[in-house]
Image (cartoon, rainbow, N blue to C red):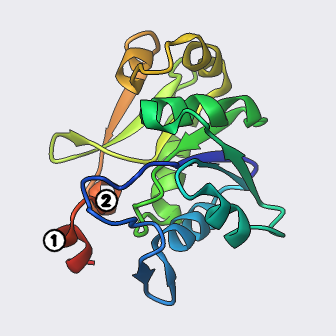
Amino acid sequence: MNIDCIIPAAGLSSRMGRWKLMLPYRENTIIEQSVDNALDFCGRVILVTGYRGDELDNLFAGRPDVVTVRNTDYERGMFSSIQTGTPRVETEYFFITMGDMPEIGPDLFQKLVDTMNRNPGIEIVRPLYKGKRGHPVLLRKSVKQTILSEPRDSEMKNVFTRHRVIDLPLDIRESFMDIDTEEDYSTI
């Protein structure tokens, strides 16, 4: 589908204690699986790199469906990576998902798009599982300017408060299975 997907992958993995994106996951690495899963539905991934960015640039070199963008400000937090990737978005809708969530599949992306299509006044759709919000988040192109106008150390919750949002209750726990600790990694 012709939808861009921003994947922030610039962080230090400080909660994990080691860089998690290149850890093995099935036949790939965590980041490769996360990107491939996004591409099972989306037309293009905008991968925002920072810490160890050269490794990710090299890993995805030659893939026309993956655009890498360097966030030189990555230590300011994830929102700065989202801001770095946002100007590259070219599609009417776009997703934001995480590089450490290798279990998100195309069905979840589709459910979010279906919800957006059924609700033309809505600008953001977020998955909800047992009362918690997760990823991916689907946004209309109209949200780009709000993201870009926020301070670099802001958060997406500040963007959400300025737009019409639907939280979509789902029984898909994959949208909440990120890998932040060794214990998280051992359960996948």
| Residue depicted at x 41% and y 25% | 156
| Residue depicted at x 70% and y 61% | 57
Q: Residue 41 location, x and y as percent?
A: 63, 61
Could you classify mark 1 by the number of other residues whose Cα lies within 10 Å: few (under 14), some (14-19), or many (20 or more)?
few
User: Is 53 left, or right, of 108 in this rendering?
Assistant: right
Q: How many labels does the image show?
A: 2
Judged by depth in the image, the label closer to the viewer, 2 or 1, is 1
- Looking at the rendered structure, which numbered label has been put on residue 178? 2
Q: Is residue 48 above or below residue 143?
A: below
**Disc with the residue nearer the chain's start (2 vs 1):** 2
Inspect this view and state whether residue 118 appears.
Answer: no
User: Is 55 left, or right, of 114 in this rendering?
Assistant: right
Q: Dot 2: what SS?
A: loop
What's the CA distance linking mark 2 and mark 1? 11 Å
Q: Residue 80 location, x and y as percent?
A: 52, 30
| 163 or 185, nearer to the observer | 185
Q: Dot 1: what SS?
A: helix
- Looking at the rendered structure, which numbered label has been put on residue 183? 1
Instruction: Mark 2 and mark 1 in contact? Answer it, CB < 8 Å.
Output: no
Q: Is residue 83 above or below residue 40?
A: above
User: Is 184 left, or right, of 120 in this rendering?
Assistant: left
